[in-house]
Amino acid sequence: MIKSTESLHEILFLFLEVGLILGSLGVVILTNIVYSAFFLALVFVCISLLYLLLNADFVATAQILIYVGAINILIVFAVMLINKPQSFNFFPSWTTGDGITCAACTGLFFLLITTISDTSWSEIYLVTQSNNIVEQDLGGNIQRIGYLLLTEFLLPFELLSIILLVALIGAITVARREKILEMRVKSQALQAKEDFPTS
Amino acid sequence: MDLVKYLTFSMILFLLGIWGIFLNRKNILIMLMSIELMLLAVNLNFLVFSVYLDDMMGQLFALFVLTVAAAESAIGLALLVITFRIRGTIAVEFINCMKG
């Protein structure tokens, strides 16, 4: 029984990772912006399922709600408002700058792979001491997150709500400036016509 | 071994995001999407360590990163729409021209 759940975990992990890598390659490489936006939605959903595999149910749900439901819709709206003429080749042409960044990223990849596999991760368990003595035995992820948000992380929580408020007001103010300018320009034009009537 | 696999894939996502920024210099919308990819990779990293160190701080911080990414995305896209409305192009090389 335990072996079957382990292999199920492995199979799901492999599927999600393949979907992730293909999706992010699609986001980065394709020239059509609409395809990139939808591949980004695939990446968000795959990451959310990966969070579910890691037993983080609240973050997975919040990820789907916020990223797919809000941010991706915003990106699709922005793609709709920005009407660029389409170039009809599927992949962009390769320049030498692309080759240099590809080489740099591949070098960084190999460096990080050796670093990750050489670090002895099992020794970290001895260093950290979980301070669960004060915390009660709350069942479930949401209860623990709620408890921590209201006791230990209260200041970041309130600051986050201020950040969201500022972002909301700022985005609305920035995006509607044109109408005020138009009205002002029109009223000035009417005023100029009144002062100097054309005879 | 499991931790190494998760960390490897998180690193691959992050490097793909960086590569996407350098590849799409002409298109700021895909640059914004690549930044979102990088934020996702960092989130995955936080959650993986939260599971392996049995600490709730990782999940909380992933929630904070989620919220800040949402706010930054909203403002970035609003600015992008305004820039396109005024200039008619979203090529990045013209953004340093401050003349309206």
Image: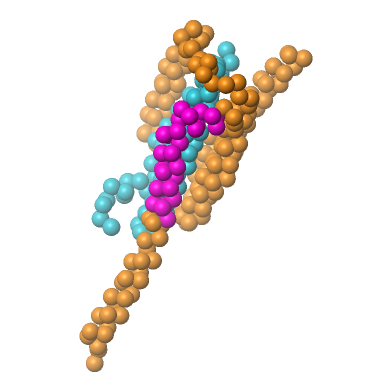
Residue B93 picture location, percent across and down: 32, 46
Q: Nearer the viewer, residue A130 or A126?
A: A130
**Residue drawn at point x = 43 percent, y = 39 percent:** A158
**Res. A187 image quadrant:** bottom left
| Residue lying furthest bottom | A199
Residue B66 picture location, percent across and down: 49, 36
Q: Is residue B87 above or below residue A183?
A: above
**Res. A22 image quadrant:** top right
Residue B16 in sight here: no
Q: Is residue B36 above or below residue A51?
A: below
Looking at the rendering, the stretch of residues picked out in magenta corresponds to A145-172
**Residue drawn at point x = 35 percent, y = 46 percent:** B92
Q: Nearer the viewer, residue B59 or B46?
A: B59
- Which quadrant holds the C terminus of chain A? bottom left
Residue B32 picture location, percent across and down: 44, 42
Q: Is residue B68 left or right of residue B50?
A: left
Q: Colour of chain A?
A: orange
Q: Is residue A158 magenta?
A: yes
Q: Colour of chain B?
A: cyan
- Which quadrant holds the N terminus of chain A? top right
Residue A154 picture location, percent across and down: 45, 33
| Residue lying furthest left | A196
Q: Is residue B81 left or right of residue B55?
A: left
Q: Is residue B55 left or right of residue A111?
A: right
Is most of the magenta stretch helix, strand or loop? helix
Q: Nearer the viewer, residue B80 or B54?
A: B54
